[in-house]
Amino acid sequence: MTALSTDSSRVRRPDSPPRVRTWIWSLGSVRWAAAAVALMLCGAVAQFLDAPQPVWWTLYLACYLAGGWQSAVSGVQALRDRTLDVDLLMVLAAVGAASIGQVFDGALLIVIFATSGALEEVATTRTERAVRGLLDLAPADATLLDDDGTQHVVAAETLRPGDHIVIRPGERISADGTVIGGSSDVDQSSITGEPLPVAKDLGDDVFAGTLNTSGALRVTVTRDPSSTVMARIVVAVAEASATKATTQLFIEKVEQRYSVLVVAATLALFAVPLAFGADLRSTLLRAMTFMIVASPCAVVLATMPPLLCAIANASRRGVLVKSAVAMERLADTDIVVLDKTGTLTTGAPQVSQVVALGEVASGWVLATAAAAEQFSEHPIGRAVVAEAASRAIAVPEAAGFTTGAGRGVRAVVDGRPVEVLSPAAYTGPPIPAVADIEQAGATVVVVTVDGNAVGVLGLHDQARPGAAAAVQALRALTGRSPVLLTGDNHAAATQLAAQLGIDAVRSGLLPEDKAAAVRELESGGRRVLMVGDGVNDAPAMASAHSSMAMGRTGADLTIDTADVVTVGDDLSAIAAVIALSRRARRLVIANLAIAATVITVLVAWDLFGHLPLPLGVAGHEGSTILVALNGLRLLRGAGRP
């Protein structure tokens, strides 16, 4: 299988002129296979009508040339690299058949083998087009809005972050951005797989390639065209197609040795009977039949087509699986570990309580905390800054901002060191208010100035819609309750767990504690899928058997670390992609069983009976075609994967 191409010059945009030929006919291998079939049929008709022998021999040899030249070139190139290519074995077998007068049987072998290769390319190209077709959804043009209010059409690829664009009803959005004017319903099914349009208003994110259905929108571009969600999907799947699963690597390692063994056995099957006086023609025919039916073509195609089709299927529904290895490993998942804030919850907490300690005012505490948090990208930091803004509290300038994953932030405000810390990272005297707020199920941070606690903030977060259903689906799929790992306090964690139906909770964890918890689960023989969104989840994700990041709210480090990314932060995608991976594995196992069974039956038939060459060719190549088409089944399927 070839890697998927991301060359945008090869992608036909919606405004491109229609092609006269279909994409299937445009494939070179399909045209050569069709030519081989036509020449073989013409040769067979000429032979049946008793045409002069040179006529139908010429037609058959032309069939050999049309259907076999690509395999011959591939085989010779492989020999230069000191490897044995199955394609070359098929060509040699066809030539051998012609040399003993079985010119029709050789032509049949060439035709079926060429057809098998053409179907493999069709399967590969269909997978590629399923992914590259996403690019067709992104419009080539955009309506740019200048500072003076004038509008003009520009190429979408020239847009840059900060540009303002206008999207009218019925138009596709030309860039990732944030709504700054208007409201509408946007069909995001091409990106996130959501079946219904999503309401978009001020401050909401929109994605390139999605369809604006009703109202007009003004959008600020937030990503370069090469970095849009859709472009990342295409690149991620292209990179995934270039990887090889563990099963595939093992098969390829065995294939070379097996192919050498087949050649050696073929030579022995030819030479030994001849040494004992066997007939040359029948001996050569049996040896060639053996070489054909024993070749591992179907075995080689058993693994990658299902995995790559599964990756393409997932990508069309907003789930990026970064490699064939990742897709294969997901099938082993028997327990799922979930982060809390930003994963099970919306990641948009709100400040619900401000407690001042000592003689300072609560407004000053909030202003000081907001000053330290104003450069933070953490949901808690954004919530603190948003609360200060909603109260019209002036936020002073800050300098020397630093952050510690799972601990908090530090900055210098009005010349004094200020820290906003998690209770676990706070090392000062006990603060009774912390326990009181945590008992109410809120997340707590401690505000310190000059190392002394001056206030406590309580924040509440809401569970994501569908989180309970996602937890139930994971329990049904793995047979175990997911595990909740969080740096939040125990009361808040257990309250959310009870709400969602999670039995196992570990709270108050620093990033290294989360990683240790994952390693502990792994040491018990379990295969852990870690799902998170923050920088503090990255160590645990790296320690897990496989990992998934929330793509919309996830930190860059988390997205880079993860094996899988869900673009729409859809929790139902966790169980869906595990199920898809398991389905792909079942198809791989079925393919290997089909290939091994056919090879065993045909080899035994040839060695201990009389297997006609045409029947051997049909059985061997038929199994190869069946395996390739079986893998393509994973490209189909409505709804989520």
Image (cartoon, helix red, strand yellow):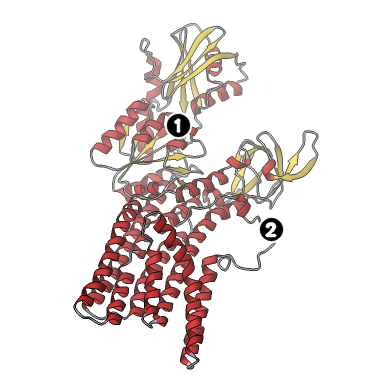
For the residue marked with disc 1, what is the amino acid? Gly
Q: Is residue 204 visible?
A: yes
Residue 218 visible in the shown view? no
Q: Residue furthest left?
A: 276
| Residue count near mark 2 (Cα–Cα under 10 Å), binned few <14, some 14–19, many ≥20 | few
Determine the CA span between mark 1 and mark 2: 42 Å
**Circle nearer the N terminus (1, 2):** 2
Relative depth, front residue between 239 and 549: 239
Q: Is residue 213 above or below residue 629?
A: above
- Give the SS element for disc 1: loop
Residue under circle 1? 534
Identify residue for label 2: 16
- Residue at 69% x, 58% y: name it: 16
Image height of 174 relative to 37, above or below: above
Residue 446, compared with residue 127, is above or below; it is above
Q: Position of residue 594 (x, y in %)?
A: 31, 67
The residue type indicated by label 2 comes to Ser
Does 95 sit left or right of 70 as displayed? left
Rendered image quadrant of residue 622 = bottom left
* Local SS, label 2: loop
Mark 1 neighbour density, 10 Å: few (under 14) some (14–19) many (20 or more): many
Q: Are marks 1 and 2 in contact (CB under 8 Å)?
A: no
Q: Nearer the viewer, residue 476 or 25?
A: 25
* Residue 236 screen position, x and y as percent: 49, 45
263 is higher (above) or lower (below) than 211: below
